[in-house]
Image (cartoon, rainbow, N blue to C red):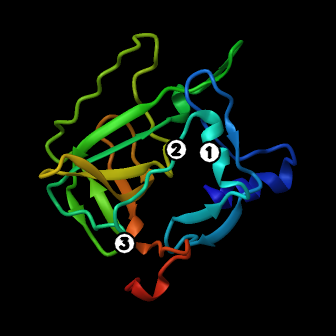
Amino acid sequence: MIDRYQQLKTTNSEAVLAITGNSGTQPIIVSDAQVIDNGGKQLDLATMRLPDAGRITWGGKSYFKAETWPPVRAQKGQVAVLAGFPGMHREPSSRGLEVRATPICDFVTSVSDRNIFLVDEDMARVAVKHNPALKDLDSLGGMSGSAVYVVDEGRHVPMLVGFMYEAGQGTHAFIFIAHAAYIRADGRLDRSSMPW
């Protein structure tokens, strides 16, 4: 995402990087955030620091405070949850940019050194549409960067494990997630622990 934004900025000086706010609030512009580290093509993960950390609250957002750092690693069979805003469900209106959240809940299918995978192996995933006017889910494009959590079954609390960076098409799309454990406490990526 950050590479694409920087590329767009060279051809369109008015391009901005923003985070959606809660209902009824304006997007939070984060174009001036400092890029702390960028994994590029090797690891599709970037970390950023806002010049004023409290800005995130302007749109009704708050930070997720992980219990431990680095985050735990996901394990096969755990329940994973994420929520994002697919581009296909974004549209301008008289109220501004309308975005619709799409939550995803599925089991972790497998885990490698590089990725966490959510794969609908049995074609059992179901899409539930609460707004019949929306198009049927076709692409998860635009959800990159969505935080992914697994559920601690004993305590019923979410634990950050990664960030979605790629997906296939439709309800049964493969979902690829980068490990959050590769982010050090200072925001830099821990390249020494990457086996590739």
**Local crowd size for mark 3, using a 10 Å CA cut-off: few (<14), some (14–19), many (≥20):** some
Task: Assess whether mark 2 and mark 1 are in contact (beta carbons under 8 angstroms).
Answer: yes
Q: Earlier in the sequence, mark 3 or mark 2?
A: 2
Q: Earlier in the sequence, mark 3 or mark 1?
A: 1
Q: Which residue type does callout 2 highlight?
A: Ser
Q: Quadrant of the C terminus?
A: bottom left
Q: Earlier in the sequence, mark 1 or mark 2?
A: 1
Mark number for residue 135? none
> Which of the 4 quarters of the picture holds residue 69?
bottom left
Please give the residue where the numbered disc 1 appears in the rendered image.
56
Q: Which residue type does callout 1 highlight?
A: Ile
Please give the residue where the numbered disc 2 appears in the rendered image.
62
Secondary structure of residue under mark 2: loop
Residues under labels 1 and 2: Cα distance?
6 Å
Q: Which residue type does callout 3 highlight?
A: Arg
Furthest-bottom residue in this view? 192
* Camera-nearest residue between 52 and 14: 52
3 or 2: mark nearer the eye: 2
Please give the residue where the numbered disc 3 appears in the rendered image.
114
Q: Does residue 11 appear left or right of residue 33 in this picture?
A: right
